[in-house]
Image: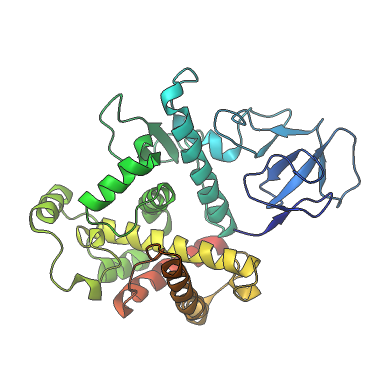
C-alpha cells in the first residue's frame, strides 16, 4: 500500500480517508490514478490532484461500508470494488453492518493490489457463469462457510469479530487468520482457472502442486481426522496447504499477495527500495529472486519489532525452497497475465 497525501496541503493520509483533517478538503480514492484526490465544486486544471464534483462523486456505500472510492456521476452508484458484492446484509440489519464495512474495507485493499499487479477482474455482469462475485453473509442468520465456487467467493462476516476469529484460529491451530487473509486465499481459488490457461501451465502446476481435481471431500476428511503429514513445513507454506492441491495453490497465492503488498508498503515508507513497489515490473526468474531477497530481511525485522513490543510475529511462516518454487510459478503466471 502506497503512502498517500493530501493534494491540497500535503498532509499524510490513510487509504481510507474521506477528509483531510489538516485543511478540511473532501477526498475520494481514484482507482485509475491510484491516489486520493480532492473533490472540488469548481473545475480545476489537470494535474492539481482534484476532480470536478459535477463529474465524480463518492460511492453509494460511503456510509454503509465506509467506502471512499469515486464513481462517475452519470454511471452506476457503486464503485468497482463494491459492485463485485452480490449479497450483503440489509441496511436495516444493524447487527452486521459494521462487520460488512470491515469486510468491504479489506476487499478494497485486495482489489487495489490485484489491479496494481495487472490481474484481470471480470464480474458476473460480464460473465454470469464464471465471473467474480462476493457473498458477504452473517453466520448468525444461517450456516455460512467461507469458500469459493465458480467465481463466487463467500465470506462469513463473523470473521470480522476479533474474539470469534481468534477462537477459530486457536481451534484450527492456525498461526495467522485475518479478514484480508481470507479474501486473498479465496481469490487464489478464483484465479487458478484464469491464470492456468494453457496445457503447459497445467502441466507445470500439476508437477508442483498436484492434481487440483483430486477428491476434495476425501482430502478434507483425511486432513481433519489425521492432521498434516509429519515434516510438512519442508514442502508447504501452511498446514492447511497440505490438505489438497487446490488449497496448496490458494494458500501459496495468498502468501504471494501478502509479500507483494507488504513490500509495496515498505517501499512507500522508505524501508525497502523503490523497486519493491507493485507497479515496478519484476519479470523473469531474477525478478522473483529480487522480491524474495527483499522480503526475507524485511519480515525478519518485522517479526523482531513485534516481539519487542510483546506481540506475536506478524508473519510466523517459513518459506522453504519447495514453497518458494511454488510461489515462483504463481509469480510467473501473474506476470504473464499482466502482460496480456
Q: Nearer the viewer, residue 297 or 35?
A: 297
Q: Nearer the viewer, residue 168 or 188?
A: 168
Quarter of the image where the N terminus is located: bottom right
Name which residue lies at 48% across and 76% down.
288
Name which residue lies at 54% across and 35% down.
82
| 311 over 152 or under it: above or below | below
For the image, the number of numbered tags is: 0
Tell me the quarter of the picture where residue 245 sits.
bottom left
**Rendered location of residue 315, percent (x, y):** 39, 66
The answer to whether residue 149 of the structure is visible from this angle is no
Locate residue 73 relative to residue 262 in the image: left or right: right
Q: Nearer the viewer, residue 60 or 314?
A: 314
Name which residue lies at 80% across and 32% down.
53
| 255 over 301 or under it: above or below | above
Quarter of the image where the C terminus is located: bottom right
**Rendered location of residue 103, percent (x, y):** 46, 40
Tell me the quarter of the picture where residue 50 sits.
top right
Locate residue 106 relative to residue 53 in the image: left or right: left
**Rendered location of residue 71, percent (x, y):** 68, 35
Name which residue lies at 14% across and 55% down.
223
Figure colour scheme: rainbow
Locate residue 134 relative to residue 53 in the image: left or right: left
Amino acid at each position: 500500500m502506497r503512502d498517500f497525501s493530501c493534494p491540497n496541503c500535503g498532509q499524510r493520509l490513510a487509504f481510507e480517508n474521506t477528509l483531510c483533517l489538516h485543511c478540511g478538503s473532501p477526498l475520494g480514492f481514484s482507482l485509475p490514478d491510484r491516489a486520493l484526490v480532492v473533490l472540488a465544486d469548481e473545475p480545476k486544471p489537470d494535474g492539481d490532484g482534484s476532480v470536478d464534483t459535477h463529474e465524480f462523486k463518492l460511492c453509494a456505500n460511503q456510509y454503509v461500508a465506509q467506502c471512499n472510492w469515486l464513481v462517475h456521476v452519470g454511471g452506476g452508484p457503486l464503485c468497482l470494488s463494491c459492485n463485485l458484492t452480490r449479497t450483503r446484509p440489509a441496511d436495516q440489519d444493524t447487527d452486521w453492518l459494521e462487520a460488512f464495512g470491515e469486510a468491504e474495507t479489506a476487499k478494497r485493499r485486495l482489489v487495489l493490489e490485484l489491479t496494481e499487479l495487472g490481474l484481470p477482474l471480470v464480474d458476473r455482469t460480464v460473465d454470469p457463469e464464471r465471473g467474480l462475485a462476493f457473498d458477504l453473509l452473517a453466520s448468525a442468520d444461517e450456516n455460512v462457510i467461507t469458500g469459493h465456487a465458480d467465481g463466487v467467493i463467500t465470506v462469513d462476516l463473523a470473521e470480522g469479530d476479533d474474539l470469534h476469529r481468534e477462537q477459530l484460529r486457536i481451534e484450527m491451530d492456525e498461526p495467522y487468520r485475518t479478514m484480508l487473509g481470507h479474501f486473498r486465499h479465496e481469490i487464489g481459488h478464483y484465479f487458478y482457472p484464469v491464470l492456468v490457461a494453457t496445457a503447459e501451465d497445467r502441466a507445470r502446476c500439476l508437477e508442483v502442486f498436484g492434481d487440483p481435481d483430486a477428491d476434495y471431500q476425501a482430502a478434507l476428511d483425511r486432513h481433519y481426522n489425521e492432521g498434516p503429514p509429519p515434516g510438512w513445513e519442508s514442502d508447504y507454506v501452511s498446514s492447511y496447504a497440505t490438505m489438497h492441491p487446490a488449497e496448496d495453490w490458494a494458500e501459496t497465492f495468498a502468501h504471494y499477495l501478502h509479500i507483494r503488498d507488504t513490500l509495496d508498503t515498505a517501499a512507500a515508507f522508505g524501508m525497502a527500495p523503490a523497486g519493491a513497489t507493485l507497479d515496478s515490473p519484476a519479470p523473469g526468474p531474477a525478478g522473483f529472486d529480487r522480491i524474495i531477497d527483499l522480503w526475507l530481511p524485511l519480515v525478519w525485522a518485522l517479526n523482531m519489532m513485534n516481539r519487542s513490543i510483546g506481540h506475536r510475529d506478524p508473519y510466523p511462516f517459513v518459506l522453504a525452497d519447495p514453497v518458494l518454487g511454488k510461489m515462483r510459478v504463481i509469480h510467473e503466471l501473474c506476470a504473464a497475465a499482466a502482460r496480456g
